[in-house]
Image (spheres, rainbow, N blue to C red):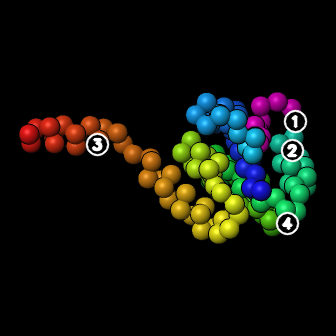
Amino acid sequence: MTKILLASHGKLAEGMKNSVEIIMGEASKIEVINAYVDNTDFENDALEFLKNLKNAEKLIVVTDLLGGSVNNTFIEFLKKYDFYLVSGMNLLLVIQLLLLKGDDKLEKELKRIISESKDGVILCNDLLSNIEKVEDDF
């Protein structure tokens, strides 16, 4: 089974899971770590999460910001633990990860999902301009 851990500065991870559940229903394979929201040690929480993974479980960690302290902490953990680390958390990305079936060709699927989620980041003003242009042509 593949587990998904959302980790972010503040409560973005928790909010992302909440948004996913509004759209998709219960998302039991998603766990969250909200870093720096209280006096708990985020790095220790992350390390305990990794230590408690079962051998048969695959893990995808999604962080909010490449180069941020949350992401950098997980980059350090990559040296010792086997998991996939993706930065640039967004709703489309998380929904697509939740829909992953099986563990076959996981790395290939992750690259496809990342590419597709990047395509979902657009300047909507351009869409409106294109629609107006088409309407003007008629």
Q: Residues within 10 Å of mark 1 (few under 14, many from 20)?
A: few
Q: Quick one: quadrant of the N terminus?
A: bottom right
Q: Position of residue 94 (x, y in %)?
A: 61, 46
The amino acid sitting under disc 2 is Asp
Marked residue nearer the N-terminal end (3 or 1): 1
Within the image, what quadrant is residue 50 found in? bottom right
- The residue that mark 2 highlights is 45
- The residue that mark 1 highlights is 40
Q: Magenta span covers which residues?
A: 31-40
Within the image, what quadrant is residue 10 found in? top right
Q: Which mark is residue 80?
A: 4
Q: Position of residue 131 (x, y in %)?
A: 22, 39
Residue drawn at point x = 22 percent, y = 43 percent: 130
Spatial separation of the CA atoms under disc 1 and disc 2:
8 Å
Q: Which secondary structure lies at badge 1?
A: loop
- Are dots 1 and 2 in contact, CB under 8 Å? yes
- Are dots 4 and 3 in contact, CB under 8 Å? no
Marked residue nearer the N-terminal end (4 or 2): 2
Q: Residues within 10 Å of mark 2 (few under 14, many from 20)?
A: some
Compared to residue 111, the image places residue 4 above or below, namely above
Spatial separation of the CA atoms under disc 1 and disc 4:
23 Å
Residue drawn at point x = 61 percent, y = 37 percent: 24
Going by the image, does 29 lie left or right of 132? right
Residue drawn at point x = 56 percent, y = 41 percent: 91
Marked residue nearer the N-terminal end (4 or 3): 4
Spatial separation of the CA atoms under disc 4 and disc 2:
16 Å
The amino acid sitting under disc 1 is Thr
- The residue that mark 3 highlights is 126
Spatial separation of the CA atoms under disc 3 and disc 1:
44 Å
- Are dots 4 and 2 in contact, CB under 8 Å? no
Marked residue nearer the N-terminal end (1 or 4): 1
Going by the image, does 91 lie left or right of 127? right
